[in-house]
Image: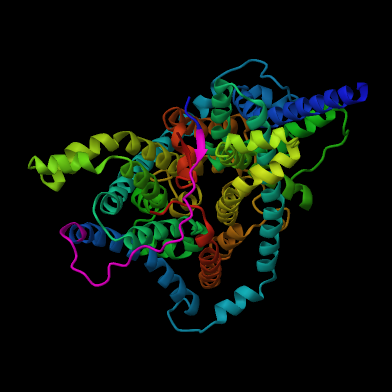
Amino acid sequence: MSRLVAELPAPTGTKPVRAGRRRRTRQERLAYRILLPALGTVFIIVTIPFVLAIWQSITADDGTLIGLRNYAKALGNPLFFDALRATGLYALIVLPTEILLGLAFALLVHRTVRRAGLRATLYVLAVLPLVVPPVAVGVVARLIYAPGYGVLNYLLQGVGVTHSEIDWLGVPLLAMGAVASVDIWQWTPFVYLVLFAGLQTVPRESVEAAQVDGATWWTQFIYIELHYLRPLFLLILFFRVADVLRVFDHVFILTGGGPGTTTQLLSLYIYRIEFKFFDAGQAAALAVLVLVSISILYSVVTRALPLERA
Amino acid sequence: MRTRRAAIALRLVLIVAGLGVAAFLYAFPLYWLVATSLKGKAELFQSITLFPRRPTLESYYSVLFDRGFWVLLKNSVIVCASTVVVTLAVGLVITYPITRLAVPPQLRVGVLNWALSLRFLPPVAVVVPYFAIVRTLQIYDQPIALIGIYSLFNLPFAIWMLKGFLAEIPLELEEAALIDGANRWSAFRQVLLPLAFPGLMAAATIVFTFAWSEFLFALILTATPNAQTFPVGVQGLVTQFEIIWNDMAAAGVIAMAIPLVLMVIGRKYMVAGLTFGVIREK
């Protein structure tokens, strides 16, 4: 069984050498001849929607310019801030839980499981939730939390925790918890896999030296392992934040944004403005706002990411 | 001494109990989905039981044939397979020059960064303009609309995975073929492509899996079984006024079965794909 490891780029202090103005080599010209048509096409396909979104956001349905009226409408809608709040709350529940649980499992398996076969089995088990379509996970959640036929109430009553029917999807905080639990079920294994791979890069000598010096589980983690995991935490945060902003499927299936608008995350909100209220102008304004904020966020964090770009 | 041993025993008990709870939370939802799908229609009106009273495949038959979901399954396969072909073709065209030819490092870094930025693009932000474009091009409710969009959104994964696989194949192999008189195209086809084949298959399984799961665009850009994909059908079962639980569960099982089968081939590369090559198997 091969090992799962994290491969981080070596920190380099030197900048790439600038060749200055020189003749392009034959290979380079060939590279541009292959690249330009492909990149150009993709670039146009990506860019047209942006331009169109901006255009849609500043015009009325008949094509007349209306300035920033759609933006005023989008920002003046109290539901927009409800959506932001719901997305923030969702992220605040989901991200710390996934990271702490994933870290705990990674440390536990790293230190107690030595058998390669068992490690391989755990790997397969951890990959499994990652490939399950969110729609299917939403269906499972519905089978568990739904009023009437939901199995969770049945189990809780069986154990004697409660004797009444708890309306998991009808109480705002419980509904948010239910929606978040789906995310946690699906993505904690991802955090586990990344951090577990990171732990494999910790040099054995420094751990052994620390153990000779009497390091406990905790000090060994704080002073040695955490140091190696730091770039991976950043990576996890980057990908998970990107994913939280696109969460749609399982929430749509499980609560549809309800009760009221308590689980109406940003993506569901934009969907609703466009396809339920048919306000394309306001939806386009929202889309532009989201795109601009994401571009800013992206440009801030991308440099810090430990990706091998060479 | 005794208290110390007791403390260790207590810690062990806590860890084992914690693992037991975790294992239950992990496995029970999956078990419950399968168990519900195996229940017969009559059982839905009786009280809940943890095991199907008389396991039957009735609900699978009902979903696939009575409700005609096999058509959606077929659409999904067509859309995902085409997405794989388009994504890998475009991905190869973009990654070949930056990994196999002598190009300035800035170009390589620029292309990879650009692909990475696409990964951060939230689909819902482009849903509005894409909807307008698809309507204008009159490809609403046609598979081609989904294929185009899925290919675009999976391109970042394909580019980063293929870059990793291509960079591992020694340049000398291609150069040897060139010296022997082959031109670039035949060196690519006869030397590089066969060597890159395992990597291509890995990228293919992962792109297929992602495309298979996609729901938002499929919901918005399709309306009839002409182009609807399987997840859209599953959603249709869920939001109905009266939910037929066993049919819904069976649809859920079918939706997750295909990615799980694919993972038999692709599991080694899944994490590498999701982390853009940071986590790899050695």
Q: Which of these two is toward me, B91 or A54?
A: B91
Q: Which residues are magenta?
A: A4-28
**Figure check: A240 above or below A211:** below
Asked if residue B133 can be seen in this view, the reply is yes
Q: Position of residue B99 (x, y in %)?
A: 29, 50
Residue B13 sits in quarter: top right
Q: Position of residue A212 (x, y in %)?
A: 71, 33
Q: Which of these two is toward me, A35 or A145?
A: A35
Looking at the figure, which quarter contains the N terminus of chain B? Answer: top right
**Figure check: B27 above or below B185:** above
- Magenta-span inclusion, residue B247: no
Tell me which secondary structure the magenta stretch mostly adopts.
Answer: loop
| Lateral position of residue B6 relative to residue A211, left or right | right
At x 36%, y 39%, the residue is B204
At x 38%, y 47%, the residue is B158
At x 83%, y 25%, the residue is B8
Q: Position of residue B246 (x, y in %)?
A: 61, 29
